[in-house]
Amino acid sequence: MTSFARPAPPSDPIPGQHLPGNRLLSGHLICMISMVVWAAGLPAAEFLIPIMPSDQLGAVRITLAAMVLLPVWLLADGPRAILRADWLRGIAVGALIGLAAWCLIMGQAAGGPVTAAVITAAMPVVAIALEVLFDGRRLSLQLIAGITLSMAGGVLALDFSAGGSNVALGAMFCCGSVLLYTLGSRLTVTSFPTLSLIGRTALTMAGAALSMLVIAGANIAMGAPLADHNLWGMREVISLGLFAIGGLALCQLLWIISINRIGIGMSSLHTNASPFYVMLIMFLWLSAPWNWLQAGAAGLVALGVLVAQGVIPLRRFR
């Protein structure tokens, strides 16, 4: 049975807490780019969702991302690093990320996109809680205020016009998704100290792909229909490439790099700005209308990040 024993604590147990300014800034910029890259893949998904069941689309997407990352890992670190990696642990950690993706699909299907987005906006709370439990992070007024601002920005950026048929069930799946993905991302950074960041990302992405393939295969075995290959053309193939390689493989690599630099707590605050990035990309590429509410919400998220990081200090009250 794979053990998730806590590795020896590094010199700075909470990444981003005592880092030099340039490393801290680069960590936040990399995380921001990760969110932009993820958002850029979503317009491509609009061409794929109507022609492919969600679990099959998720399995194909994650598998394609893993097939891209594994050769990059081979070229970067050589075959010895791949052969000596702890594949059993990597598959187990990756399975958490794969299950998180499946839970999000199920949660959105049952509770609607608003339910999924609202609960995903609470990801910083889960991330900070993990750092409090495992890394000894201390809660402060500064940190709580930053989390609150970030979550408020995430909720304000939502479109509440869509709902779901079973909000309670959807919320349960979405909560599971946030917990599994946050834990899986953290373990990706902490459980493989001898691997490079590209190695950790590729290894756990392979585990995520295996778990999603098992889920999709089980659904097909129980009678779920296969995607109709006659509906696929060059546009759909290119869209899948953008959705998988840019929106997942590159995004996940940048995400893991940012977690390694500033920690899962600070990185998770950036996720609440993703609706603004989606709106901005749709505005620039597809002439969608500009949404000032989402723009203001993104500013609120940015303010929350700055407050939580201590860049903008709060007054001390006795």
Image (cartoon, rainbow, N blue to C red):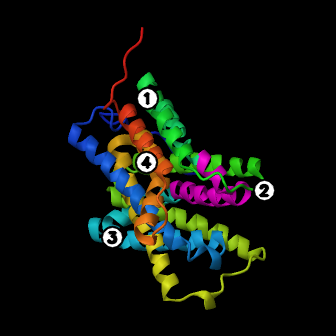
Are the residues flagged by discs 1 and 3 in contact, CB closer than 8 Å? no
Q: Nearer the viewer, mark 1 or mark 3?
A: 1
Amino acid at dot 3: Val
Residue named by callout 1:
143
Q: Which residue is mark 4?
A: 191
Q: Which residues are magenta?
A: 92-119
Between disc 1 and disc 2, whose residue precedes? 1
Q: Position of residue 213 (x, y in %)?
A: 60, 70
Q: CA separation, marks 1 and 3?
A: 37 Å
Give whichever of discs 1 and 3 has the lower sequence position.
Answer: 3
Label 2 environment density (alpha carbons within 10 Å; few <14, some 14–19, many ≥20): few
Q: Is residue 71 visible?
A: yes
**Above-or-below relation of 124 to 225:** above
Query: Which class describes the residues within 10 Å of circle 1: few (<14), some (14-19), or many (20+)?
Result: many
Q: Secondary structure at mark 1?
A: helix
Q: Is residue 313 left or right of residue 3?
A: left
Image quadrant in which the C terminus is located: top left
- First in sequence: mark 4 vs mark 3: 3
Q: Confirm whether the magenta stretch covers residue 153.
A: no
